[in-house]
Image (cartoon, grey):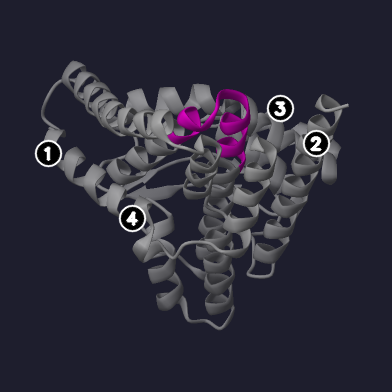
Amino acid sequence: MDFIVFIMALLAERFLPLVSWYHPNTALTAIFSAIGKRIYKAAEPNSYQYLAAALASTLILSVVLIIIVLLLEFAFYPELLAGLILYLCLESKAIDKKALRIAKLTKQNQKSAARELLKPLVARDVTKLSGAGIIKALIESLILRTARYYFVVIFVFLVLGPIAALAYRLLTLIEQAWRSNIKPNSPFLKPLKITLFIIEFIPMRLLALTIAASKASKLSMHYIKHYGRHFYQTNTGWLLSTCSASLGVQLGGPAVYFGERFNKMRIGTERLPIAEDVPITINRLNQARVFWLLVVVCIEILKNI
């Protein structure tokens, strides 16, 4: 029963994704953003920033998770509720659709419209991005969002259960909401970043190795060694390194946040990405998705033999 519900949740997210304007995540993001604005004090010392962020995120998780645990405890069919939680935590198909639309607009030289669609997907300033910059930022966001909001969610769900998957997804929503108003190097964000780094350590690397195995394996390992291990965040570095090698394009590089330039490492020495690379990126991620779905199915079959 549990496995059937799991597959149903994956199929529902793939073929019946919720529109963002009535998805619960939209309301939650607005609430978390308001909480962040309320407690964030840029002039306060680092100790205040760490404590405020840790207490606020803990309080948010506690309130939501207690409610969900009670619902699971008294539900007639807790498996179905667990499947609903997974369905609401997953986000992949909607990102793919928006990415293809942005790529099409960029190819048609409608850069202003492309930037407006890109803006909600990234925390960086997009107003001065060139066509190549739009596509590069789009591909990076597509890779990282799919990794976090699909692969890591499923990994946590299968290993630790629906409550843990929901807790992880709430942490990503909190970070996303707070980053929209706070610079990425702020100590206020550090507790969340450390927590997410620990949770994502294994699944991000498994995804990176899966993509590396599909194409350009030697180059991918070379990129991980020379770029990924020295990136500002190694989970992200591994994943972008293997995708850069697989696509044969340059990723990473400087980005502007709230008027300040952050000199992030460039990954790769190949050409800059173009609009045609976006569907190829989606295809690479879909290949990894199918591979790991087959692995999960095989494990389930072996368990029942």
Task: Indicate the position of residue 224 as horizontal and vertical percent values.
Answer: 70, 31
Instruction: Please rate how many residues cluster around mark 4, counting C-alpha atoms within 10 Å: few if below 14, some from 14 to 19, many from 20.
Output: some
Give me the C-alpha separation between circle 2 and circle 3. 27 Å
Residue named by callout 1: 38
Q: Amino acid at mark 3?
A: Lys
Q: Are marks 4 and 2 in contact (CB under 8 Å)?
A: no
Task: Indicate the position of residue 32 as horizontal and vertical percent values.
Answer: 25, 42
The answer to whether residue 159 is magenta is yes
What's the residue at 68%, 58% (across, down)?
A: 282
Give me the C-alpha separation between circle 1 and circle 4. 19 Å
Q: Amino acid at mark 2?
A: Val
Up-down: is 201 above or below 174?
Answer: above
Q: Amino acid at mark 4?
A: Thr
Residue named by callout 3: 225
Magenta stretch: give its range: 151-166
Q: Are marks 3 and 1 in contact (CB under 8 Å)?
A: no
Q: In front of the other: label 3 or label 4?
A: 4
